[in-house]
Amino acid sequence: MFVTREQMARAQRWREGVGRRWASLSEREREVLELLAEGQSTQQIAVALSIEKSTVDTHVGNVLTKLGVASRAQAVTWVWKHGVFEEMDTCGELPSNLAKSPDKNGDFPDDKPPEM
């Protein structure tokens, strides 16, 4: 399969965008998002994290803003669409398979593009 430089650049921008959005979330916001993705309600999240429901609502609002989505459902969709909990660690770093970048010739260090 042949991949053009434009496609490589687009993939690189996508990885960087996902990484930036993930890194913008605080550790607590990531915890809230993970619990949302598991289908937990505001009350369940509050109990699980030993915080007030209003604090959960604040964290959810911050998550929505930082991810650029309008609802909890869209936030959960963003998580699964981008493979965040499967592919990223909780420190906000892209995993090695997504962090690879091509060199100036468009080649990858191990001769394989990142898995997506």
Image (cartoon, rainbow, N blue to C red):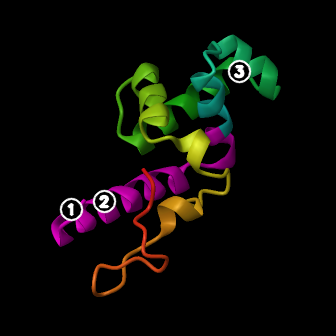
Label tally: 3
- The one nearer the camera, 70 or 116, is 116
Please report contact status of discs 2 and 1: CB closer than 8 Å, yes or no. Answer: yes
The dominant secondary structure in magenta is helix
Task: Estimate the x, y position of residue 115 in percent, counting from the top left.
Answer: 45, 55
Report the side of 108 relative to 4 (left or right). Answer: right
Please tell me which of labels 3 and 2 falls first in the chain. 2
Q: Dot 2, how many residues are within 10 Å of its Cα: few (below 14), some (14-19), or many (20+)?
A: some
Question: Dot 3 lies on which element?
Answer: helix
User: Relative to 54, does residue 16 appear above or below in the rendering?
Assistant: below
- Please state the extent of the stretch shown in magenta in the rendering: 1-30
Q: Which residue is mark 1?
A: 7
Residue 78 sits inside the magenta stretch: no
Judged left or right of residue 43, residue 68 is left
Residue that badge 3 annotates = 45
The residue tagged 2 is 11
Could you say which is closer to the camera, residue 10 or residue 39? 10
| Label pair 1/3, CB-CB below 8 angstroms | no
Q: Residue at x 42, y 41 (%)?
A: 67
In the rendered image of this protein, does residue 37 appear above or below residue 78?
A: above
Secondary structure of the residue carrying numbered label 2: helix
Amino acid type, label 3: Ile
Vertical placement of residue 96 versus 25, above or below: below
* Of 98 and 77, the residue lying toward us: 98
